[in-house]
Image: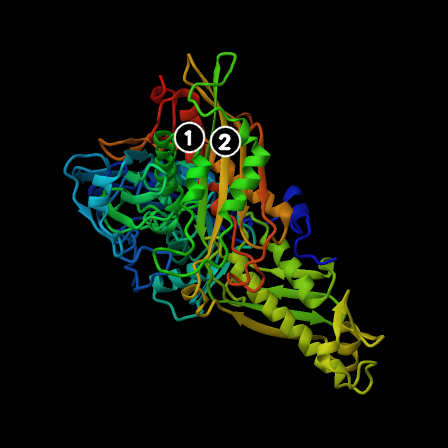
Amino acid sequence: MPEIGSERSRVDGQLKVRGAATYAADFVLPGMAFAVIVGSTVGKGRITGFETRDASGQPGVLQVLTHLNTPKLPYLPFRTPIDPQVGERLHVLQDDQVKFFGQPVAVVVAETLQAAEHAAGLVTVRYDTAEAVTDLDKPGLPLVTPTGGDYTRGDPVAALASAPVKVDGAYRIAREHHNPMELHATIAQWEGDKLTLWDKTQGVLSTANEITAVFGLPAGSVHVVSPFVGGAFGSALRAWPHVTLAALAARQTGRPVKLVLSRKQMYSGTGYRAANRQRFAVGADRDGRITVMVHESIAETSAYEQHTEAFSELARFLYTSPNVQTTYRLAELDVNTPTYMRGPGRAQAAFAIESGLDDLAYELAMDPIELRLRNEPDRDQFNGLPFSTRRLRECYEIGAAKFGWSRRKPQVRSTRDGHWLVGVGTATACYHTIRNNAQALARVKVDGTAVVASATSDMGPGTYTAMCQVAADSLGIEMGKIQFLLGDSTLPPSPSHGGSQTMASVGSAVREACESLRDTVVRMAVTDPASPLYGLDPHQVQVRNGRLEASGKSDSYREVLRRRNRDAVEVTAQWGPGDTPRQFSSYAYGAVFAEVGVDETLGLVRIRRLLGVYDAGRVINPKLARSQGVGGLIGGIGMALLENTVTDHRDGRLVNASMADYLVPVNADVPAVDVLFLDGHDDKASPIGAKGLGEITIVGVAPAIANAVYHATGKRVRELPITLDKLL
């Protein structure tokens, strides 16, 4: 039975449930000191002085670092494709400028964490303050247009004016923060000019290269180790300032230094999903054929970097429309730089687009699913490319049958359950299939076991397990005899672990390396006079359970290597997408269904049921895939109903920067969630047929819930999160 497609439990599961998995902050080094950040208490201005004597005089305090006593760092030019391409990252402790509330302005290093925390509270900072602009809705904000921000097809202005049926709405989404369970942490240790970082990161190579550039070190000087990541959702795609501070503190003290951000510090120390404002207008003929779509987006970014996302992508191709206009603007505010958060750009855009499509369906008195399917394109209208696969219609058909959509009463406020108004809604999910060059090493040992390795990460989707499954099928070795290594920058390079690209990219490289290794051993056998397979055509040899078989004869990995006196044979291989992304439009698709209850008196919204049905190509492990799907749907509940970072615009302070005040879904919010994946294989997306499914599972959830709320109440809420004040 092949491993790919089989439900396998996580190979690292026992380590995690026993507490034996070693996360960044779990490493203990001899002589390790502890660092604590002092954050700015103003949103903008200039530091005029420090009072650090009380802090420095505390028992166990080693140093108090500020811009006044910290060496200037080179900060050589470097950016990954994930980093903002316009602007310059924060140069931490390099000058007296304060750019946002909570910016690191000092670091205390002490023998113990308690001493460092106490001393950090004794540091006094004096400021010459300036007005901090943090409100995306402030009138007259200057806006900038990022590269590729505008697009026009046909004549959307005239088409919208003449459309027989049209809707036009303004949408708002609050800022959200990632809040993974694991706090961001770094341990830094110098040995001469060599630096080792034990870091929470989704990209060991990008972190190594960033810190190499910050400190002006020779290539290969920084070694990053990150075997386990306790959730990230995009927050660990960059090396944030605390990584530099840990390395700086270690160099200044000559000691290994551990720096762990507090939960509160994560709100200003790492990125977040930027608040945004959108306008979506759609026009159609009376048969429901869309004639025009206009999508305008404005999002916050920092004053020092332009963080951009794919806000405009979906409107350009998701539905057939001869006339399309998209615009994208950034408001540069006195805040820290946003970053990618699960389903970036598409999750926010889908809220506006899918809510607008729902409104259009009601204007047409048409079933919302029928409206979407009536406007299915036969190719990507943005670039003219054929789809690698597009099975959205099947997602809706299967999902509607499973969810019981046919029992839906079309009229709003038509279904009750006691004092609850009950509504159902649906929305389309879509996310780009990203693939990048990746390398993998495969080694088979004389004992018949194998090691496969790549410098990727596993922040929760099950990379360790899925890669073992790919390797097992490619090598013909039992999965239990394969060890997969990741999370180390000295391993063969791979892209960062984000954008749902790991399975398609690294998985394809693993397949390439393992098949090459298998073929190498087969050739060793058929050219070995002592082998039972000697002289046979290597293409006839099949490998199963560690045995090489053909024409009723067999050999084994173990025996082939033993006869050659080899302890191991290894191969390193690379895979890349080549020209395929320029030949096919490749996306994962899905249909999300939601049923909600709304308390008619109190305005409370409760999820009753959620279902997501996805076309994500080949599913390597249905058990892991379901876990990803459920997690994405739950994240969508948070986006729709709960998550909202609140800013005090007087100084930029985030007033709910804690798990007590920033609301995320808990078990009581998630009564019935189900996920289905179509059986498929997209060989245009990747050799293993996978498209990627982590990101898409949050896209479409918020609008499906919003559409269900409208069906229940007859009130269209165009602002997330949907809280009771918007319904009363």
Which residue is identified by label 1? 707
71 shown above or below 715: below
Query: Disc 1 marks which amino acid?
Result: Asn
612 shown above or below 237: above
In screen coordinates, is 468 left or right of 696? Answer: right
Q: Residue at left 55%, top 44%? A: 628
Residue 411 in the image, given as x and y percentages of width and height: 43, 22
Element type where label 2 sits in the image: strand
Category of crowding for the residue at label 1, using alpha-carbon neighbours closer than 10 angstroms: few (below 14), some (14–19), many (at least 20): many
Q: Earlier in the sequence, mark 1 or mark 2?
A: 2
In screen coordinates, is 229 left or right of 657? Answer: right
Query: Disc 2 marks which amino acid?
Result: Ala
Question: Distance between the Cα atoms at labels 1 and 2?
Answer: 8 Å
Residue 60 in the image, given as x and y percentages of width and height: 44, 43
Question: How many tags in the picture?
Answer: 2
Mark yes or no: residue 119 visible: no
Do the residues bearing badges 1 and 2 touch, measured as CB atoms within 8 Å? yes
Which residue is identified by label 2? 594
